[in-house]
Image (tube, helix red, strand yellow):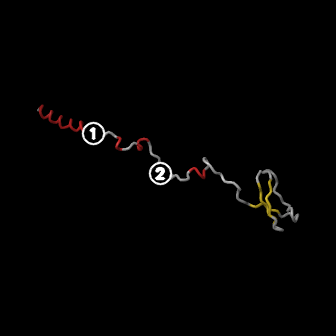
Amino acid sequence: MPIYEYRCSACGFQKEFLQKIGEAPLRVCPECHAESLAKLLSAPGFQLKGSGWYATDFKGKNPSKPVKTESEATPAAATPAPSASAAADGPAESKTSAEAK
């Protein structure tokens, strides 16, 4: 059950009351018995902590960095470069074709 805070505008009496959500708001002041009790807005008395809550989901993370795809995640050094034997084959083919003429 929620706790509601009330203040009397006639005498200034202020107190918290435990009420059901569906209950009608209190109107009569318990101190001066005037019908001038008003419900106040107050901050909740708890904080949501732990993993899974929105307040902590992005804490310490930089959301501006884009997520890399699988092709971007592969470093350029991992792509095969022409081998030394392939470079040696190139001039050999030209010599062979020159010799064939």
Location of the C terminus (image quadrant): top left
Residue extending farthest to the front is: 50
Left or right of 14: which side holds 96?
Answer: left
Left or right of 53: which side holds 13?
Answer: right
Residue extending farthest to the bottom is: 11
- Badge 2 crowding class, 10 Å Cα cut-off, few under 14, some 14 to 19, many 20 or more, is few
Q: Position of residue 79 (x, y in %)?
A: 34, 40
Q: Are marks 1 and 2 in contact (CB under 8 Å)?
A: no
Quickly name the residue at label 2: 65
Query: Which circle's residue, 1 or 2, is located before the other in the chain?
Result: 2
Q: Secondary structure at mark 2?
A: loop
Quickly name the residue at label 1: 82
Q: Nearer the viewer, residue 27 or 48?
A: 48
33 vs 81: above or below: below
Q: Residue at x 80, y 51 (%)?
A: 20
Q: Amino acid at mark 2?
A: Lys
Q: Secondary structure at mark 1?
A: loop
Left or right of 89: which side holds 2?
Answer: right
100 vs 67: above or below: above
Left or right of 68: which side holds 55?
Answer: right
Q: Amino acid at mark 1?
A: Pro
CA separation in Å, label 1 and label 2: 33 Å
Image quadrant in which you'd find residue 88: top left
Q: Residue at x 60, y 50 (%)?
A: 54
99 vs 61: above or below: above
Residue 30: assigned label: none
Q: Position of residue 96 (x, y in %)?
A: 15, 33
Q: Residue at x 77, y 59 (%)?
A: 5
Q: Nearer the viewer, residue 33 or 101?
A: 33
Q: Position of residue 48 (x, y in %)?
A: 65, 51
- Badge 1 crowding class, 10 Å Cα cut-off, few under 14, some 14 to 19, many 20 or more, is few
